[in-house]
Amino acid sequence: DVKVTQSSRYLVKRTGEKVFLECVQDMDHENMFWYRQDPGLGLRLIYFSYDVKMKEKGDIPEGYSVSREKKERFSLILESASTNQTSMYLCASSLRLAENLLGNEQFFGPGTRLTVL
Amino acid sequence: GENVEQHPSTLSVQEGDSAVIKCTYSDSASNYFPWYKQELGKGPQLIIDIRSNVGEKKDQRIAVTLNKTAKHFSLHITETQPEDSAVYFCALNTGFQKLVFGTGTRLLVSP
């Protein structure tokens, strides 16, 4: 059974703290993604990675960084947490496709609800 | 970037009724259109997808239709059941292996 796990379901941090969100997948997927989910805004892509040590900015990368040192693990880092980063964070993974193929399924973790006070 | 409009934001139906959720988009290069269901406390899960060379796809009580000319696609759920209550997201591919998601529809099926 495919699985994406996230290190915490709930997290409470203070403004200015450095925050690490961890994601691990056991499907040997090349692609991994970090989204944030906010009411009325859907899922917005923060960063994604298509290989170890590779990363690309998504639509809302400001205030975030990522790390992919191993294929199965993708970390989201909030260098200095702010209250506007209070949100649900979702990690996902997918197989890499050849460029001439259409999109494929992304598998999501259960999410981490982060509150920044 | 690509924008996906999803309507309605909330939808309440009686058990046994049909539910329809519609998404419109602007990027004519998009060719993959998945739908995800998110149950309470869980991450989204793919329920059905359609590719641009197909106009309609059906899987038991759910179906998706695609109109590439008009740039919209819809999710149809027939004979709704209480367990269909969830948040549904449409999505489409943009760029290399990325998806952009709609804003979500909260479906409530009342017994």
Image: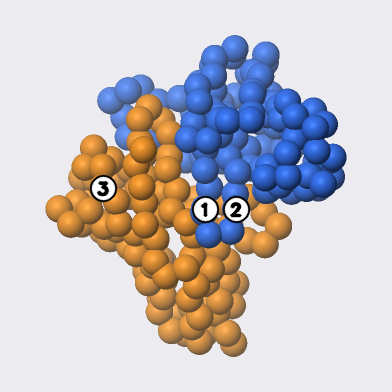
Pointer 3 residue: B26
Residue at image point 68% right, 29% down: A76
Quarter of the N terminus of chain A within the rendering? top right
Crowdedness of circle 3 by 10 Å Cα count: few (<14), some, many (20+)? some
Question: Can the viewer see residue A112?
Answer: no
Q: Which mark is residue A115?
A: none
In the figure, is residue B64 to the left or right of B61? left
What's the chain of the residue with tag 1? Answer: A
Residue A40 is left or right of residue A90, and the answer is left
Residue tagged 1 = A42
> For the residues marked 2 and 3, what is the alpha-carbon distance in whole angstroms?
23 Å
Q: Residue at x 34, y 64 (%)?
A: B22
Kindly identify which chain the residue marked by label 2 belongs to. Answer: A
Colour-to-chain, orange: B
Which residue is disc 2 drawn over? A38
Q: Are marks 1 and 2 in contact (CB under 8 Å)?
A: yes
Does residue A45 lie above or below B47 as drawn? above
Q: Colour of chain A?
A: blue
